[in-house]
């Protein structure tokens, strides 16, 4: 008998890394979600349960949950008549810019691929998972889901159809994440996308293209300093910074504490700092970021992590 149940671990991810809007993604070693997928005879129906961090803020309606959207898409595309139960145990804070919805989508398509023996390639997994992102972000951006599936650093080389290039991250690269405990509006990512300019000046495009190219070079040559310096962004960061209280101060304090790069994590409000562990202490940088938020009267969570692997099956 083929297995009827599988448990999948999916990583948090940080999208954009400065100039790579909708193109760059980085998988984080911590935090992760655990998703258990069970095939049932209650056909055709999708049931979702959510536990863990801020679970009460996540919809369990299949059409409004990225995991449900992905499962439904697979049932329809393969003409399958079966039930699917999805139990999501959140370790990733939702609505912070840490790829929480992408993790659920990636885990679901990865788990169903295994259970149903669909033999989907990594790129095909990304295409399904990106459709789930429409439910939470209003657009099928593939940066978070690609990083969640491939692990490490990804470049979304093309959309329509999605094509992805995956690269290893340098062993000396450490990451600090911090976010203020603010209430984000419903449709947070949709709103954060609506403040972006529709057109960019050639000057800014030249600036960002240089940084994007340098970033890729930084990953190829395992140069953490170059990766950090390349996070500078002339288009999206200036338009979104005002959405994150104390953004400028937190950035300043992270760089002063030794980070070599800083930016908004995805659509925020989390921020990400890159640390070269040969040159600075990530705990010190994370603490400086937290204190900087707190100096403005905001409760904040900060932690250190490093680049991580993509989705994987968990042993029972
Ligand atoms: N690239 C997307 C954005 C990521 O910045 O809107 C959202 O998680």
Image (cartoon, helix red, strand yellow):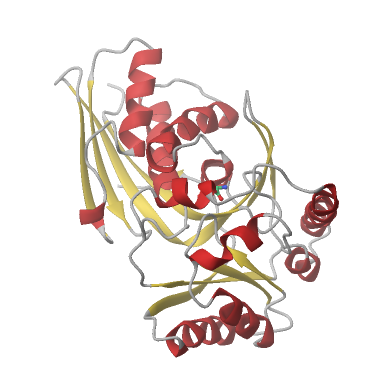
Q: Where is residue 177 in the image (x, y as percent from the top left)?
A: 52, 70
Q: Which corner quadrant of the image does residue 45 belong to?
A: top left
Q: Where is residue 119 in the image (x, y as percent from the top left)?
A: 50, 22
Q: Position of residue 76 (x, y in %)?
A: 35, 15
Q: Which corner quadrant of the image does residue 262 belong to?
A: bottom right
Does residue 198 appear anywhere in the picture? yes
Q: Identify which residue, 66 or 82, lies in the foreground.
A: 66
Q: Position of residue 40 (x, y in %)?
A: 18, 25
Return the residue found at the far left. 42
What count of labels does the image hold? 0
Return the residue found at the far top. 79
Which residue is located at x 57 percent, y 47 percent?
147
Which residue is located at x 78 percent, y 57 percent?
215
Does residue 282 appear anywhere in the picture? no
The quadrant in which the N terminus is found is top left
Which residue is located at x 34 percent, y 37 percent?
67
Q: Is residue 57 left or right of residue 262?
A: left
Which residue is located at x 61 percent, y 58 percent?
239
As displayed, is residue 19 above or below residue 223? above
As displayed, is residue 171 above or below residue 110? below
């Amino acid at each position: 008998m083929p297995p009827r149940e599988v448990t999948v671990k999916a990583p948090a991810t940080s999208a954009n890394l400065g100039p790579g809007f909708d193109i760059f993604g980085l998988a984080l070693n911590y935090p992760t979600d655990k998703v258990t997928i069970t095939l049932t005879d209650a056909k055709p129906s999708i049931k979702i349960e959510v536990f863990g961090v801020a679970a009460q803020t996540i919809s369990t309606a299949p059409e409004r949950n990225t995991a449900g959207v992905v499962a439904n898409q697979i049932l329809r595309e393969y003409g399958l008549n079966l039930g699917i139960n999805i139990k999501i145990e959140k370790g990733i804070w939702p609505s912070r810019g840490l790829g929480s919805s992408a993790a659920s989508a990636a885990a679901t398509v990865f788990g169903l691929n295994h259970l149903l023996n669909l033999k989907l390639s990594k790129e095909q997994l990304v295409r399904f998972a990106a459709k789930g992102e429409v439910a939470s972000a209003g657009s099928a951006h593939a940066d978070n889901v690609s990083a969640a599936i491939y692990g490490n650093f990804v470049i979304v080389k093309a959309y329509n159809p999605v094509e992805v290039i995956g690269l290893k991250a340098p062993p000396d690269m450490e990451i600090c994440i911090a976010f203020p405990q603010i209430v984000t509006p419903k449709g947070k990512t949709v709103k954060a996308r609506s403040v972006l300019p529709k057109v960019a000046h050639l000057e800014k495009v030249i600036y960002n293209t240089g940084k994007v190219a340098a970033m890729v070079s930084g990953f190829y040559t395992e140069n953490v300093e170059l990766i950090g310096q390349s996070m500078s962004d002339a288009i999206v960061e200036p338009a979104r910074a005002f959405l994150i209280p104390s953004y400028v101060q937190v950035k300043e304090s992270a760089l002063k504490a030794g980070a070599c790069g800083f930016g908004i994590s995805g659509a925020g409000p989390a921020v990400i700092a890159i640390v070269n562990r040969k040159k600075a202490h990530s705990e010190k940088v994370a603490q400086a970021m937290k204190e900087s938020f707190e100096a403005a009267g905001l409760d904040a969570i900060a932690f250190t992590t490093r680049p991580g692997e993509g989705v994987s099956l968990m042993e029972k």
